[in-house]
Image (cartoon, rainbow, N blue to C red):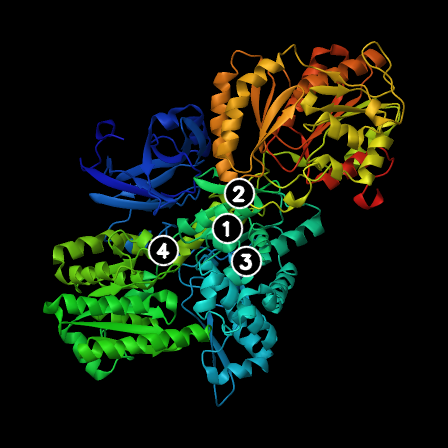
Amino acid sequence: MSAKRLVKGPDGTYAELTLSVVATTRVGQTVHVTRLPPHLEERINVRKFAAGAQLLQEASQLVTTPQEWPSWKTAKPLIVCRNSAYKYCYSIVDGCNLVEAEASARVVHITTNEAHVSDVFGRIADERIAETPENKALCSTNAMSTPAVKPAPVQSQSARIYIACFHLPVRLFRDAVLGKWTATWGESLIARRDGSVANDLGTHWIGTVFAASNQVESAICDEHDQIRRALAPLNCTPLFFAESTRDLAYLGYCKQILWPSFHNVDIVDLTCACWKPNYGDPAFVWDQAATEHWWDAYVSLNHRFYQALSDWICDGDIVWVHDYHLMLLPNMLTADMDRTYGVHLSQHRRAHIIFFLHIPFPTSQIFRSLTRGPELLEGMVGADVLGFHAFDHARHFLNACKRLMGLSHQSVRGGLTGVEYLGRTVTVVVRHVSIEPREIATILNDHEFPHPPDMLSASVTKDTSTRAVFASIDSCQRLSGLALKFLAFERFLWDFERWRGRVILVQLAIREGKRLADESRTSSEIRKLVVRINTAFPGAICYRELAPPDVTLRDRICLWGRATTLVGTAIREGLSLAPFEYIFTRQRPLAAGLVLASEFSATASLLNGALRLNPFDSASLAAAFDCAMSMPDEERSGRHARDLPYVLSRPSGQWTRGILHDMWQVSSSAMSMSSLDGHGHTFGGQVIRDSPTNRSIPLDCTQLKWHSERTIRKVVLLHLGGTLVEKGERVGKYLKPNLHRPSSMHKSSILTEASIRLLKKLSESESTTVSVVTGVTMSALTMTLGQIPHLGLAASNGLYFSHACRLDNNRVSSIPRVAAHRRTWTIHDYSINWRSVEKTMLPILKWFTARTNGSSIIGRDHGMAWSYYRTDPEWGRIQANQLLTALSVLLSPYDVVASHAEGIIEIVPRRLQKSAVVRDVLATNRELHGETLDVIVCVGDDACDEEMFGSAHSFLADHSPLRSSKVVTRTVGDNPLLAAFYCTDHDEVTCALHALTLRTPATIDSI
């Protein structure tokens, strides 16, 4: 928008106008603003203006950042007429295409040289005066996106968020005289605050409670009703457990098993680090069966949460599960929805489930040491969205899914990562969170600040005013690295004499009382070091041990106000907010602070201005202390300035909204800024409406009822593995439990008797032709299904084919109902000299087999194969890709190709395709029955089966009389294939096939 297009205002002057708008866009979309002609006033004229493509031609693009989104603003001020009405509208554009435009014109009156207007996309207010320093209060009533105006309360019919957490984010108090309970919000990330998502969506918290004082903890067991009434105004529902169940689940399995393991403490460490209370008993440490009662209590705890939530959640609700205490809950809720609505782990769910892990996730090597690891992973992937604080934690989770469950991951729209599990995409997100700046600013603005921290003695307070202060607040545990910090500080005082008497290390250790053996041993170690160091260097260390209630936010801020440097030496740590509090506190007029961050903490990956250090390297850590003391003020200020914007821009409310946005984006929810109309739910002024996915739709067995009529001519084409039988272990799984089976056993041998009887009954129908197409060998397929005479069989993906015995024509031989080994097979060798092919490729196959432990060469009469199913999944896949590259060159002179299937590379004829089998079966049916064909049913489970789907459609298209025939294509799992329907597993396939033999709807129990 340029000034030359404008006419001067009545006073002959221009003005600078800055526009900002809140608009929720998808990835790749941008927001534009268009100046409208002065004469354009009517609603219909704006639409005509947009339809005439003038909207984009006259538009200026707005800009945003990841931190500011969904707020967009003009890149530079617009030049507009002063003292006149300015008309404009916003639009959302994807590339060169107009996605959405506002239906009415906006009008603003500019009265000053500089003006700013804040809007919300889709909400049109009456004509207003632009915001200026003089009329800012007036404009805030019209600019609906300004911080001064809170979003409207959520409608009663809107969706709700249920936050499930073991510890409710509240503090309970009991009046000792009146016996009355009161509750206030705590400092938790999920507590309600001014900017909380609870202001936009109805939010309810469910969890357990603990008293703020140990003296009244026992009263909780006797006064449940009073506690419920005290928590009701906060929308919190407490769950009460028997003390034995709570202690076994929380202090037992959570704190003695999960917490150490998730911080990468393995079984060997447990034997010498006294993580468990009975660490002197080898059987208790090494045999996890001795802690099975802990696991039972953990399952019981999760099930109690599930029972409460299952009674509350409705369509469109959100269940947000927090932390490792409730890892089984997402899958419990998912299984409940599947049983209730008959939707087995599909994308079409009545409620969204989020799980966020607030501690690190261990390496797959450590996680595999947990005997209940697979159950924990299955519990997590029951959610729609899985969140982590750091990418390192998410990477370990993805690796565990790959190596323990064989689940692959890929990028999904919006720069996110998705894990495919049973036809459903589980989104993995990394979302960073910081502190609440407003709360700390309130403390800093107190006229009494900074007063001495209450937990420090008068002598120490005096020392902190005359010495440079290194400070830290950590849990009293070995993983906090306190001993490493003190040893390095001692070395610093010995090596750098000039700082003796000029520095003090203030260390507060929080004793939570949850891992008593660990806390006791850590305390003993630290106290010995403190005595030794203070003996050599009097007053060098101030060490205090405190309980959590004794260290408030005000106390921490007071300590940070006196500390010139914050020191973190954790050797395993999730996200600590202490460095963020410190950075915010050390703003002007205080001198800029410096953070020393352990490279093993999540903080080191988030703060660019921190000095990263290895706490195990005492010499380097001692040098870091010296560097902090010697660092010029300019460098300190520069490092502080790098991290301050990050600290300011990620309060918990924005963190919560970001995760909800990720969830709605992946679930293809339609977002708009229009008013609530009863078809969606509001969120920050938006309306969220669910839209259907573009995947296949679930198959209802009743849809096949009419196909069971005997007068209807049917052709049924079925895949074997993953369709008629349960799919084997994924090739990506590191440990495959079925490897103990004899190598002679094949997946076809586990076909159930019920499935065999069903195939026999279906194939005996005179109006039905049934064929099974599979990649298994001819001998294995004959041994399994050869005894069914009326069943067509295609082995090795069509290289060998055997028609049904009743097809007696020139191309097919008839065989008896028994003697399966006498079944007649047709071999399609395509005139390939297999001896020459084998001679060429055998050396390279042997070379790769020698390099890849667990791989093998499979010899066949007509071809060869190289299997890496039993290898390390990642190494096997790398070797397979290299082998494919080598074979593509070696086999180019021959009419063969290297085909890469799951866990195997096969050398097959170039012209060999499943589509050829489909065409052969349909052509044979046409020869025998003429143009009579009513329906073709194709069922497969992976991308290779798309050839069958496409070949069936193309065959009907090539034969005009058959074009009215119906093709029913189905895939097992909600995969993005060409199939029109999907069945969730092989049991539903069996149920669907059974429906073809009955006049009534089938269930799996009726087979």
Badge 1 is on which residue? Answer: 386
Snapshot quadrant of residue 22: top left
- The N terminus sits in image quarter: top left
Q: Nearer the viewer, residue 756 or 185?
A: 756
Query: Where residue 602 is drawn, which disc sits there?
Result: 4
Tag 2 near tag 1, CB within 8 Å: yes
607 with respect to 539 (left or right): right
Kind of element beneath mark 3: loop
975 with respect to 341 (left or right): left
Residue at the farthest left position: 498
Kind of element beneath mark 4: helix
Badge 3 is on which residue? Answer: 370
Image height check: is 680 above or below 84?
below
Tag 2 near tag 3, CB within 8 Å: no
737 with respect to 626 (left or right): right
Query: Where residue 127 is drawn, which disc sits there?
Result: none
Q: CA distance from mark 3 to mark 4?
A: 24 Å
Q: Earlier in the sequence, mark 2 or mark 1?
A: 1
Query: Where residue 419 is drawn, which disc sits there?
Result: 2
Q: The disc labelled 2 sits on which kind of residue? A: Val
Q: Nearer the viewer, residue 995 or 924?
A: 924
